[in-house]
Every structure is written in structure tokens, then in C-alpha cells.
Amino acid sequence: MITVESLTRRYAGFTAVDDVSFTARPGRVTGFLGPNGAGKSTTLRVVVGLTAPTAGSATIDGVRFADLPNPGREVGVLLDASAQHAGRTGREILTLASDTMGLPRRRVDEMVELVGLTPTEAKRRVRNYSLGMRQRLGLATALLGDPRVLILDEPANGLDPAGIRWMRDLLAGFAQRGGTVLLSSHLLHEVEVVADDLVVIGNGRIVASGSKDELLAAAGTLARSTSPRDLAHALEQAGIPSTLAGDGSLRTDADPATVGAVALAAGVALTELRSAEAAGLEDMFLSLTADTQREGAAA
């Protein structure tokens, strides 16, 4: 289990992560979502001991990553698939990692086969790898020590559709066997398919967390109008709180029928009205992080 408690990280007056707390539980895949610059990578770097926290803590089964006697046997980490020695072959990288962890050499062959690298590709130097091949090698390294926890940052980058499907099945199977998966990705559809729990971060703070089903079910109603501010004002006058997102959509806890009746009475034309649950993870994500989206802010 991964436990992050009141985690804060500041850089020369800039707060990258601000009082973040969440838990990634065994037997579940936890999706860690947020716009670029929201604090995802900083949080993961603190969890795996690459960055020291300014305040708070991050532990794995109650122990800091730096205090684990043989971290690779406990936690599999993939933060940057490109951060591999370009002059070594894939097999050499896995062999060095295996020797460092005190593993039998047969684990190298097992991992090469597991991630779908051919024997010829395993002997090729990493500088000649595609991004998808580097991702597979990074996953092989993360899984090499048979860890009980996986921490992955954008593991599907560069994978083709078949590779994404393979990774999805791999992570789901890992969790079903009791493992803990903390997955950060911008591929919202893939997260929606594989994740059991979601943690959404924006501007360094958690804006939503819980099970995927609970968060989507609590999404309320999504409405769009030719006059979104007029609609928001009409709802306010009716005593119904709402949130106007940067993309012009409006979200409220009231049911669609109530929103439609208010709009009709106010003479506000609706262009879309539906349960926000049906909108899926993407709409929920954009709504929760509207104030931190670069594109939305620019608009």
C-alpha cells in the first residue's frame, strides 16, 4: 500500500505539491490524473525517494522508499522510459538490474519474454529503440524483482494499440493478484478502463479522490448553453449551485429535469443537457481541472 500524507514540496517560493494526501490500496489500480504541471511527477518522485519532501511523508507499507533494504524487490518503478543508458543493450540493462537485486539470471529471459521484446531486440542497443520498445524495457525492469507495488508514470507512451491493450491486461492482472498499482497517465480512456480508484490533482492540490464508480456517479448534471453565464445566474436565482468550466460547460448536482425547467423558465436555450456520469472520465477531469488547463486558460 502507498500512503501519501500531507505531502508538500516547495521550490524557491513555488509550491509544486501542496498538502497532498491519498492512498493507493492493494488489489487495486489507482489512476493519478492531472494537467501538465499539476504536481503528478513531483509527487511520484517524492514517493520513490528521488525528491525530498518539504513537509509530509510518502511511505510504502509504512516504510519510506529510501529505507527499503532492496527497493527493486518491493517496488517496481517506471518514471521515464527515456532515462536508460543508450549505449547498453536491453539485455545488459536487465542483467545489471538483476545482479544488483541479487536475482537469478533466468529472470532476465522471463522479463524479455513477458514484455514482448524479441531476442534480437533485447540484444540491440537502447539508442536504437523506439519509444514503445523503451517502455517495454522499462516495464521489464520494473517487474524484474517481482515487486508487490508498481509506480508508473505515462507507461503507455509510444505503445501501439495492441501494446496498450497488453499493458492494460498486465496491470489488471497484477492488481488481481493483490498488487498495488499507482498509474499516472494523460490517456484518460485507458485510465478509465483499467483504474479502480482515481486521484485528481490540480495546481498541486487534490481536487477529487475516491473509487472511479463513486466519482463518476456523483458527477451530477452537465449542461451547455449559448449563454452559459445566464444559465449559471438562473440556477443561482433558483438556489442551485453550479460550476462553470473553462470549456463553457456547466456542472451541477441538480438532476437534468430540474436544470431544464430552470433554463426554460429563464428563457435560456440549452444546447446539451445530460447526466454527467454518461460524459465519462474525460469530461469529469476537464471540469475538475478547468482552472489549471493551459488551453482553457489561454482561451
Image (cartoon, rainbow, N blue to C red):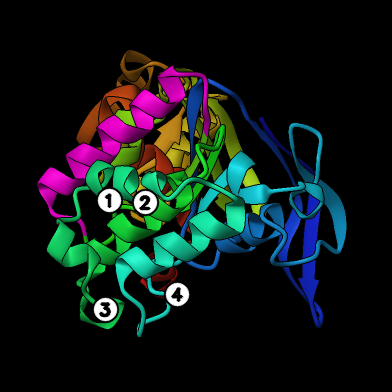
Depth-wise, is mark 4 or mark 2 nearer the camera?
Answer: 2
Callout 2: few (<14), some (14-19), or many (20+) C-alpha neighbours within 10 Å? many
Among numbered discs 3 and 2, the one appearing first in the sequence: 2
Q: Nearer the viewer, residue 129 or 288?
A: 129
Residue 241 position, x and y percent, is 56, 31
Image quarter (top left, top right, bottom left or bottom right) of the N terminus: top right
Q: Nearer the viewer, mark 4 or mark 1?
A: 1
Mark 4 vs mark 1: which is more N-terminal?
A: 4
Residue where numbered disc 3 is placed: 125
Tell me residue 274's x, y (percent): 26, 25
- x%, y% of residue 140? 37, 51
3D distance between C-alphas at marks 4 and 2? 19 Å
Judged left or right of residue 97, residue 47 is: right
Given contact means CB atoms under 8 Å apart, are the residues at marks 1 and 3 in contact?
no
How crowded pointer 3 is (Cα within 10 Å; few <14, some 14-19, many 20+) is rated as some
Q: Secondary structure at mark 2?
A: helix
What amino acid is labelled 2 in the image? Val
Start-end of magenta stretch: 159-180
Q: Secondary structure at mark 4?
A: loop
Q: Tell me whether the residue at label 2 lies in contact with that at label 1, contact meaning CB atoms closer than 8 angstroms.
A: yes
| Residue denoted by label 2 | 108
- In three-dimensional space, the C-alpha distance between marks 2 and 1, rounded to whole angstroms, equals 6 Å
Front one among 283 and 49: 49
User: Considering the numbered disc 1 on the image, is that residue within a helix, a strand or a loop?
Assistant: helix
Q: Which mark is residue 112?
A: 1
Q: Which one is in front in this view, the residue at disc 3 or the one at disc 4?
A: 3
Q: Which numbered disc, 1 or 3, marks the residue that appears first in the sequence?
A: 1
> Which residue lies at the image location 55% right of the left edge and 37% below the top edge?
147
